[in-house]
Image (spheres, grey):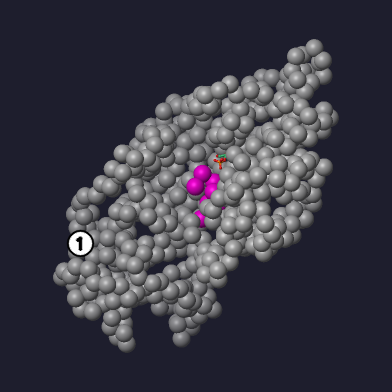
Amino acid sequence: MARESRVLDVNTSYAYLLWARDFATTSIVATVDDDPGGFVIGYRRPDEPETLMIWQVAVDERHRGQGLARRMLDELVDSLSGEGVRRLETTITADNSASIALFTSFANARDAPIERTPLFEAAMFPDGHDPELLFRIGPFSTERSTTPGGVMSMTTTTEPATAIFDSLESQVRSYCRSWPAVMTHSQGSTLTSEDGREFLDFFAGAGALNYGHNNPALLDPLLDYLREGRIVHSLDMHTSAKRDFLQAFSDLILEPRDLDYKVMFPGPTGTNSVEAALKLARKATGRQHVLSFTNAFHGMTLGSLAVTGNSMKRRGAGIPLTNSSKIPYDDYFNGAVDDFMWLERVLQDSGSGVDKPAAIIVESVQGEGGLNAARLEWLKALSDLCREHDIILILDDVQAGCGRTGTFFSFEEAGFTPDIVCLSKSISGFGLPMALTLIRPDLDQFEPGEHNGTFRGHNLAFVTARVALETYWADESFQNEVQAKADELRAGLTTIAERYEGATVRGRGLLTGIAFPDASAAGKIATAAYECGLLVETSGPEDEVLKTMPPLTISSEELARGIAVLEEATAAVLGDGVPA
Ligand SMILES: Cc1ncc(COP(=O)(O)O)c(C=O)c1O
């Protein structure tokens, strides 16, 4: 009947009026500084009066990101606890990560169990509506009791308790200085702080959360694996979790791309993968020197720091960083000098004084170095040059890999095959530490045990990594979605950049941002965005680039919302600019 009754939806406002009259005690309206800011409406199920069914949560766009939804929900539930309400139900579509985060954080805060089951299939709706999942939360304990339903007002936010971080944690900490909220929960593209504020994530764990936070497709197999008493830690012993991961990586990633690599598991971070690559290249060639690029970033341990550009980070080494030289990245001279002119010349000239390098290490998009995206033909020419001179080409795909630029590897469209590839960050899919070094078979020259590490066998990461490959990389649909979202992001950022003289859009895929001529602007915009509930960072040698890196699973609605916040934050810092 519901499916057949196509005209019923025009009665929505009428339904709201009835709701306001008949269900006032199970609904709540919030005012923010005397303005209506949002509402939550629900009813007690006649067959189960201890259950409050939440039918709608709405927050005015201007008041999002301040934890208003959570406060209304808490207030409403607490107000009904005196009447015996012990459970909460709601229906949510699978892609509504903001609502999933809201209700998950509500359940977690009350230590209440949460069940998710399908309720209405898509076929039951007349209008192409997505399937609705039923979330059942409870039983939860009572808290305070006030007058049922009504109007709630809010004017202040509470300061988070951060004293222990300030007194005990090393001063090296950095992200928390820009984002002082104490985070407690996360779901999809949303993080929630302990004071109930929600933050849309345009940061994605610096690229470690390409598939979003607590992705249910990965969480459930992980929890099953843990509950079954399976192997968690194993160094490099054989485990079924590792076997299944290797099989999936071979079937879904290497074979379809015609890539012939040995897979090495170094320690579980990006810098471990780079160290292994550098050591191998040196061992295999018997040469020591490695060339890397201006503004490169490859990690913080001494070998990878030596091939990193940033002077502040290099100073932290405390010893000379040797055995490497920097060469200009693509477009370093704004097109004024031919690509590779210097490199080609010194490699040919036996009097140049430049030792023939063991390897050249490169990122196809420099994430930390300011979102410089090398042209694909430049990357291909670099590969040709390495081949010609018998130099190993290491492609550091730690940040730009795992789909970030729209294809699984960032070099796929450039038409060459690197000799060694470094992967980490999102390879586990779930934010668990894991890294791979992919090696051309004849370079696989470490003796057994010659490059060890206690945490190379992180089976939880193998489990989620395998499921991530099976969920997102079994066909091209996810890749196509990412590319469509990358176009939306680029279009939104271009509209902003066009308003401000000298601002340029940089990057590739969902690793794109805006470089501002006034180097201080990006940091101020990121701060303003945080105040509006958006996490976004800066990059580049002067932090001059506003760097956006949302989860690849972000919805178009969330992407548009984040871009709108950036637009507002930019206007707040730089003024309205030139109308487009
Ligand atoms: C390209 C690249 N390589 C290596 C690393 C180092 O990774 P990790 O911080 O996991 O050591 C990073 C980190 O941002 C990176 O972006």
Asked if residue 210 shows in the view, the reply is yes
Region in magenta: 205-212
Asked if residue 381 shows in the view, the reply is no
Toward the top, the furthest residue is 351
Location of mark 1 (residue): 152
- The x, y position of residue 392, in whole percent, is 76, 34
Along the line of sight, the residue nearer the viewer: 501 or 155: 155
Q: Residue at x 71, y 31 (%)?
A: 360
Ligand 1 is in which quadrant of the figure? top right
Q: Secondary structure at mark 1?
A: strand
Label 1 environment density (alpha carbons within 10 Å; few <14, some 14–19, many ≥20): some
Q: Quadrant of residue 505?
A: top right
Q: Residue at x 33, y 63 (%)?
A: 109
* Pointer 1 residue Cβ closer than 8 Å to ligand 1: no
Q: Residue at x 81, y 15 (%)?
A: 349
Q: Quadrant of residue 255?
A: bottom right
The three-letter code of the residue at mark 1 reads Met
Toward the left, the furthest residue is 147
As displayed, is residue 569 above or below residue 285?
A: below
Along the horizontal axis of the image, is 513 left or right of 237? left
